[in-house]
Amino acid sequence: DHFKQYNDDNGHMKGDETLFAVAQLLDQQCKRPSDTCARFGGEEFTLLFSEMSEPALHRKMHDIIAAMKTLNIPHNGSPTATYVTVSLGAIIVQPSDVVDFSLPIDDIIKASDRALYQAKNSGRNRFVINYFSAIK
């Protein structure tokens, strides 16, 4: 959260170090062989968890936010917290969302982005989980 401010206050080298630490933390949350963590651009990352129940996804999101707090990277310019935080947007895709054995990846990305901005607009350092089918 507020990563531009972090870069402005600490410099891009420190920003890159912080992105690397966050990437490692997120990658550690991908424990199953089918889980994937990737940098999506800038300071955004994508995590893909297949066959995960909604309660398990809630726990995973809570775990990520708690791990960021434990990482405790100072972010004095943040209005959200004194440490680097993350906002998370998640989409649950159900089998009924798959049409002709394909998924509209652009729509999934847009829906995930909407969930992310819901989390940011509701105070940051939190997560929002939406169902893909409900927001097409």
Image: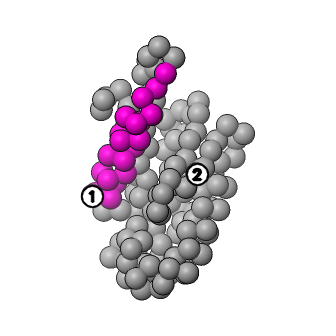
Looking at the picture, which amino acid does disc 2 mark?
A: Ala
Q: Measuring 72% from the left and 39% from the top, which residue is drawn there?
A: 33
Reading the image, the residue beneath label 1 is 121
Q: Measuring 48% from the left and 57% from the top, which residue is drawn there?
A: 41
Q: Is residue 106 magenta?
A: yes
SS of the residue under disc 2: strand
Report if the CB atoms under discs 2 and 1 are less than 8 Å apart. no
Q: Nearer the viewer, residue 105 or 9?
A: 105
Lower sequence index among marks 2 and 1: 2
Where residue 129 sits in the image (x, y, percent)? Answer: 40, 42
Looking at the picture, which amino acid does disc 1 mark?
A: Asn
Q: Looking at the figure, which quarter contains the C terminus?
A: top left
Task: Decide: few, some or many residues near mark 2? Use Cα within 10 Å; few <14, some 14-19, many ≥20.
Answer: few
Reading the image, the residue beneath label 2 is 38
Where residue 88 sits in the image (x, y, percent)? Answer: 43, 53
The secondary structure making up most of the magenta span is helix
Q: Measuring 35% from the left and 62% from the top, which residue is drawn there?
A: 124
Where residue 79 sits in the image (x, y, percent)? Answer: 32, 76
Visible residue check, residue 82: no
Q: Which residues are magenta?
A: 102-122
Q: Looking at the figure, which quarter contains the N terminus?
A: bottom left
